[in-house]
Amino acid sequence: MTNMPRTKNKRLLSLLLDPLSPPIKSKYALAKLAGCHPTWAIKFIQEIEKQGIVKGLEVLDAKKGFERFQTMNPQKIEPVRFSVSDTSDFLAWLTMSDRLEYALTTYQAENLVQGHLFPHKITLYVKPENLERWKVEVSKKGVIGGGNIELIPAHYDELFNSHLIKGFRLVNIPQLISDLYREKGVTGEAADMLLEKLVKRKV
């Protein structure tokens, strides 16, 4: 069962931290974007102000804010894996398909945002209720097991505040950094680079 307080706060933080988020001019506007009551948003802002993360809507310590964001993520959910012979064909299909909501993460998303990693694997979050439909669609292009395609059911707002970049839907930047750290290995270096950009960003 989804932990609603955690996901509300995760949405609020992702909007504040993400450099690709729309401009936020008030706490009421922030609450509306996050889909929560203004009182909830105001109390959360007051809480993270005491922690030195923000002052009002201004981010003072992005690294500490991201560490707080990390505590709101569940353990990694085991993906459904597929093997396809031509990932470029799958990516082309994604750009033309608007039937099922998704958001790319890890290698492919990082490559589109920063270009540090070679996108040898395509990982995407999908709505849990659409997972079976995704399995059917991807099975038309490859075989289950392997592989170079991963479908992860989004249970904790991983699809929230996604961004359209170069024709693809990507997770928000804090979520991308979090997922890169979970992958470990070379992806950790790419995550460090993205986090450093958050830290240095002028707000």
Image: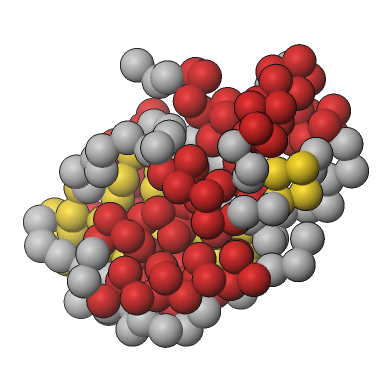
Relative to 149, is 85 above or below?
Answer: below
Residue drawn at the location 30% of the way across and 50% of the way down: 151
Residue drawn at the location 34% of the way across and 16% of the way down: 1
User: What residue occupies the far right of the structure in this picture?
Assistant: 25
**Residue 121 pos. (x, y %):** 27, 71
Would residue 139 be found to the left or right of residue 6 on screen?
left
Relative to 1, is 105 above or below?
Answer: below
Would residue 29 be found to the left or right of residue 115 on screen?
right
Q: Nearer the viewer, residue 100 or 164?
A: 164
**Residue 193 pos. (x, y %):** 47, 75
Residue drawn at the location 60% of the way across and 65% of the way down: 198
Q: Nearer the viewer, residue 81 or 180?
A: 180
Residue drawn at the location 25% of the way across and 43% of the way down: 76
User: What residue occupies the far left of the structure in this picture?
Assistant: 145
Rendered image quadrant of residue 12:
top right
**Residue 203 pos. (x, y %):** 78, 60
How is this picture coloured? secondary structure
Rendered image quadrant of residue 84:
bottom left
Q: Is residue 193 visible?
A: yes
**Residue 56 pos. (x, y %):** 80, 39
Would residue 10 be found to the left or right of residue 58 on screen?
left
Would residue 127 be found to the left or right of residue 161 on screen?
left
Q: Nearer the viewer, residue 106 or 71?
A: 71
